[in-house]
Amino acid sequence: MSSSLSRPSYSSSSRTSSPFFSNHSSLINGDTRRSLSFLSASPQELCLRSQRKSVQSSVVLQDGAVVVTNSSPIEKLKDELLSIPSQEVVAELGGGEHESTVSITVVGASGDLAKKKIFPALFALYYEGCLPEHFTIYGYARSKMTDGQLRHMVSKTLTCRIDKRANCSEKMEEFLKRCFYHTGQYDSQEHFVALDKKLKEHEGGRLSNRLFYLSIPPNIFVDAVKCASSSASSLSGWTRVIVEKPFGRDSKTSAALTNSLKHYLEEDQIFRIDHYLGKELVENLSVLRFSNLIFEPLWSRQYIQNVQFIFSEDFGTEGRGGYFDHTE
């Protein structure tokens, strides 16, 4: 199955003059473009309307404030973007009079990446109000652990270093209360069925959307996706999978991995993430390249073969040696 992606049309003048693009440009990307289209844009007002037939939704920017008007139960823009159900489900529920929830399962929750990067990033989203009102985070791994032990492990890596507000400790406590743990093998249908049962208990009959964040080696991606797709996918909302780098060892294994995942997922359900691309040094590369009068005329394939980034770490591989031994 393939889905067409219709890009919104807009004039260059409206894009540069509207404060929406300077403050919220990250919201208009990939998957969001499938459900939102531009109707009008001006320095004072930008209006977007959902293309879904059974739900009429619009987002209006007026004098710097976002105003959402719709007939669906979604009252906030972040909930609209994270809680879009299928048209069939909305029609069956009679126009969307049911609340939705997002269940985030971190597969490989006991690993280094999850502890140091993923859980702190999820807390940062919660801290800034970027997660929907109803959400649950489940850690899934082979290590035996209780909910309390997971929360203790996660609490040691959470921080409010970016914006120290008075209620930081309260936010941490509220976030940890939404974190749970389930022990299971990555290739076990039975264990994912048990996870599905726990997720349903927390979803409480709401329209459920499920996100599986794979923080595991690429050689077990397919096993985990197969089990999650057949035993723990959402029956009423969407199911999506995030795969972290490394996505294969080279271009050949990356292509083979993509083909294998497509046996169980559509392409628009797969999201690939390399967290190193979000580092400031990497993001500033284009600025260095195009804004420097010395580099600009010389930085081309005629003069430069490749650009390398070296990130020195003050700790060892910590269990990652097996991957680096086989990386080309």
Image (cartoon, helix red, strand yellow):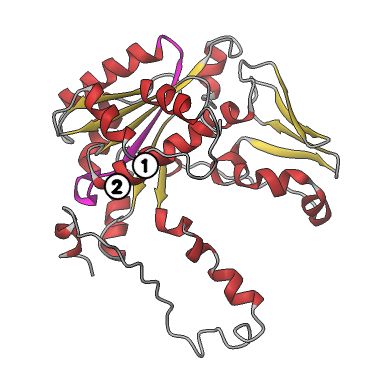
283 lies left or right of 114? right
How many neighbours does mark 1 have within 10 angstroms: few (below 14), some (14-19), or many (20 or more)?
Answer: some
At 43% across and 77% down in the image, what residue appears? 307
Residue behind mark 1: 118
State the image coordinates of residue 22 (x, y, percent, origin top left). Answer: 71, 49
Residue 59 in view: yes
Give the side of residue 319 with respect to residue 109, left or right. Answer: left
Q: Is residue 211 rendered magenta in the image?
A: yes
x and y, in percent, of residue 57 in the image: 69, 24
**Identity, as a three-letter code, of the amino acid under mark 2:** Leu
> What residue is rendered at 18% in x and 36% in y?
186
Report the magenta residues as a range. 204-221
Residue at 25 percent across and 29 percent down: it is 150
Determine whether, in the image, residue 158 is placed left or right of residue 34: left
Secondary structure at numbered mark 2 = helix
**Closer to the N terminus: mark 2 or mark 1?**
2
Which residue is under mark 2?
Answer: 113
Q: Residue furthest front?
A: 166
Estimate the x, y position of residue 194 in percent, counting from the top left: 21, 19
Q: Is-magenta flag for residue 69?
A: no
Which of 242 and 293 lies nearest the eye of the viewer? 293
Front-most of 112 and 100? 112
Q: Is residue 269 visible?
A: no
What label sits on residue 284 in the rendered view? none
Question: What amino acid type is highlighted by mark number 1?
Answer: Ile
Q: Position of residue 292 (x, y in %)?
A: 64, 79
Between residue 171 and residue 54, name the one nearer to us.
171
Q: Are marks 2 and 1 in contact (CB under 8 Å)?
A: yes
Look at 42% across and 80% down and name the residue there. 306
